[in-house]
Every structure is written in structure tokens, then in C-alpha cells.
Image (cartoon, grey):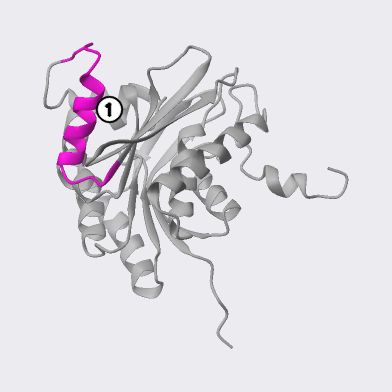
Amino acid sequence: MQIQTSPLILTFGPTDPVGAVGIQADLACFAAMGCHGLSVVTALLIGDTARIEDLQVIEADWVSDQARVVLEDMPVTAFKVGAVASVENVSVIAEIVSDYPDIPLILDPFLTGLPEQRIESDDIIVAMRELLIPQATLLVLSAVELARIAETWREPSTAEDTLMLDAMRIIEMGCEYLFVTGTPSDIHEVANSLYNEDGLVRRDQWQRVSGAFTGAGSTLSATTAAMMANGLDVPEAIFEAQEFVMASIAHAQRLGMGKLIPNRSFRARDSEPGH
């Protein structure tokens, strides 16, 4: 008997021993949204709840082989690409996803807190700009990360209209949607903005939650990918994912002596007897 499977999402990213970011975080978010996660490891992180101390990049051939074997066996509904710490891996992932142009690509390429800013080297950013961003259905960046990418084509700027200009430049590269977190807002609120070829699509504001967290960005992009795999269009998926992130942060856990970790399984715990 054929059993109906959950939507399958293939994520590319680093492993995190803590489970705050990277593949472990993605898999938790996919499961919470009723999806099954498939994974391709791009790097190995060493770290705890306070910081990421180092990483070991996986060779590009290994990245390619992991993905190709899975894709030949299973029908994937969405791609999610996280931090990729080498130009060679950017290139090989871009080649892989280009073979599946009908599968949506959610790209969240920065990982804050890495030593020596390993993900932010100019060569890697330029490679992402030229090879991955033009294929992205949705690119997720903070306002600071957008400015960092923009500095590969313009001088640093503090002009008020720079964010919109940079956002539309990203869209002109071929990216269908750009979601920018941490856009200018009241100090007590978090504002996030979604753009496409028509300009600003939606702007959402949320009450700022006090505390030091790690993994909120990974939760946002992974949950959005899962929502899209479940059939939601990008604007609706983005809104639903933000709601989930805020709830995950509200239920955050202190697993160690460092930062709080969003609780992606809070719904399961709330449904347990006695909760």
C-alpha cells in the first residue's frame, strides 16, 4: 500500500552540536511544520550556547555527492540553503539547484557569530551574489547583511533610502522575493520587510522580546521553507513563519550558560497532559 509522505525539504548547511542553528535547527522546524527534512552537510561547527569557536568546511565533491544521491531517490518539494563557507561549495550547490528550476529555493546564507567572519569574505559573498541569489525564490537577510552584500557593488552608505535601493538591486539580479529583518523601526519593536519586483510587499512589526537569543534567524528561514513546501505562497509563508518564531522565542530554553535557544517544539509540549 502506498503511504502518503510528508513534504520533503532538502537543506544545505553546517551541523551545530547545540542544535541552535544549521541543519539541526532546520530539521526541528521542518518536523514542527509536518515536513520531513533531508540534509546535506556543508561544514562542521564547534561551539556551545555562548559562541561558535571554529568550523571545518566539507569538500565540494562530498557536498555534491550527498545531494545527488538523495535527489536521485526522492522527490524534493523545496530547497533551503544556509551558511556555505567556501566558494567551491557555493558553486557546486548552485549547479545542483539549477538542475531543478521548478523547486523553490529559500536562501539564508549568513551565520552570525562565526570566528573571523568566515561566511562573510568578499569572495564568498560575490559567488553567492552571482550564482545563488539569481536562482532564489526567497532570500532572507538582516538589514546589516543586506548592506554587507551591497558593499560588493557600492561604497558604504548611511543614506535613508539605501535599504530600498539595495533591496531592488537584489530583485533585479533575478531573486523573486527578498525578506529583510531588522528594518528601521521603533526601539521597542522589530520590523521586517518583504520585497519583490513591485517593491515593498508587506511590512510586519513585532514587539521586541528582551534577552540574548541564538537561532531565531535559522528558525525563520527554515519555517518559511516548510510553509512553502506545504503550499503557502511566499507572503503568507513569511507571515506564518514570523508568528512561529515569536512563539518559539517566547518559549525559549536556557540549555547552557550562554544564549537562549528558541523552542521549536513548544506546540508538542503544550499538548502534553498536564500542560
- The quarter holding residue 238 reads top left
Q: Where is residue 203 in the image (x, y as percent from the top left)?
A: 40, 31
Whether the magenta-drawn stretch holds residue 16 is answered as no
Residue 64 on image: x %, y %: 28, 59
First to last magenta residue range: 156-177
The residue beneath circle 1 is 146
Q: Is residue 146 rendered to the left or right of residue 22?
A: left
Q: Can residue 23 be seen in this view?
A: no
The residue sitting at 12% across, 16% down in the picture is 155
Evaluate whether residue 67 shows in this view.
yes
Q: Quadrant of residue 50?
A: top right
- Counting labels gives 1
Residue at the (21%, 12%) spot, across then down: 159
Q: How crowded is mark 1: few (under 14 residues within 10 Å), some or many (20 or more)?
A: some
Q: Does the magenta stretch include residue 159?
A: yes
SS category of the residue bearing label 1:
helix
- Name the side, left or right, on which 15 lies relative to 184: right
Q: In this view, does 272 lie above or below 9?
A: above
Q: Which residue is drawn at 20% across and 57% down?
A: 95
The residue at the point 40 percent across, 45 percent down is 235
Q: Which amino acid does label 1 sit on?
A: Leu
* Image spot of residue 161 (x, y percent): 22, 18
